[in-house]
Image: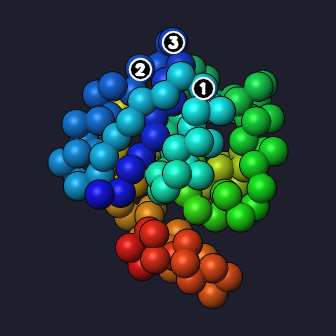
């Protein structure tokens, strides 16, 4: 089963997301820090959903993610979930250095959204890293 790591913010709880992910055949694991999230990705998790309290993505978590090597980033889909986002806003996601944005109101659709994002990322990374692409189901 493909694993998605959930990193909540005290003001944005992602526990309801676990059910939506499970309904789409994805396993959810909740962690307390970006360091723990990285360990899960290194161990095989294919997605990371970070809860953010505002549409700004700055600070320690953003810096920590920016320091991940590109080979590690290719191995997962990184999504920000919180208020003030438009689900699927690719331009803003690019500007924030992540793969996907999800508005908090779409928590019930997170499984569908992440499943689609995993397939898309697999197709994108296939020419660069076929092993990473296989992890996504591509």
- What residue does disc 2 label? 13
Q: Quadrant of residue 131?
A: bottom right
The residue closer to the viewer here, 48 or 95, is 48
- Furthest toward the left, the residue is 23
Judged from the image, the secondary structure of the residue bearing numbered disc 3 is: loop
> What x and y, as percent, mark residue 112?
30, 55
Q: Earlier in the sequence, mark 1 or mark 3?
A: 3
- Residue 78 in the image: above or below residue 30: below
- Does residue 112 appear anywhere in the picture? no
Give the mark toward the camera: 2 or 1.
1
- What residue does disc 3 label? 10
Q: Which mark is residue 33?
A: 1
**Left or right of residue 85: residue 92:** right
Q: How many marks?
A: 3
Task: Please give the name of the residue rendered at 41% of the width and 46% of the height, measured from the top-left corner.
Answer: 4
Give the class, few, some or many, for how many residues have Cα within 10 Å of label 1's Cα (few <14, many ≥20).
some
Q: Quadrant of the N terminus?
A: bottom left
Give the class, few, some or many, for how many residues have Cα within 10 Å of label 2's Cα (few <14, many ≥20).
some
């Amino acid at each position: 089963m493909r694993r998605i790591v959930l990193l909540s913010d005290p003001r944005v709880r992602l526990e309801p997301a676990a059910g939506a992910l499970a309904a789409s055949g994805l396993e959810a694991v909740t962690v307390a820090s970006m360091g723990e999230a990285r360990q899960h990705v290194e161990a095989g998790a294919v997605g990371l959903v970070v809860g953010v309290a505002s549409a700004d993505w700055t600070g320690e978590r953003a810096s920590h993610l920016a320091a991940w090597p590109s080979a590690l980033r290719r191995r997962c889909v990184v999504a920000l979930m919180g208020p003030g986002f438009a689900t699927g806003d690719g331009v803003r996601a690019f500007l924030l250095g992540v793969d996907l944005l999800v508005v908090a109101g779409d928590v019930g659709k997170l499984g569908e959204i992440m499943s689609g994002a995993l397939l898309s990322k697999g197709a994108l990374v296939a020419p660069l890293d076929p092993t990473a692409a296989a992890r996504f189901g591509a």
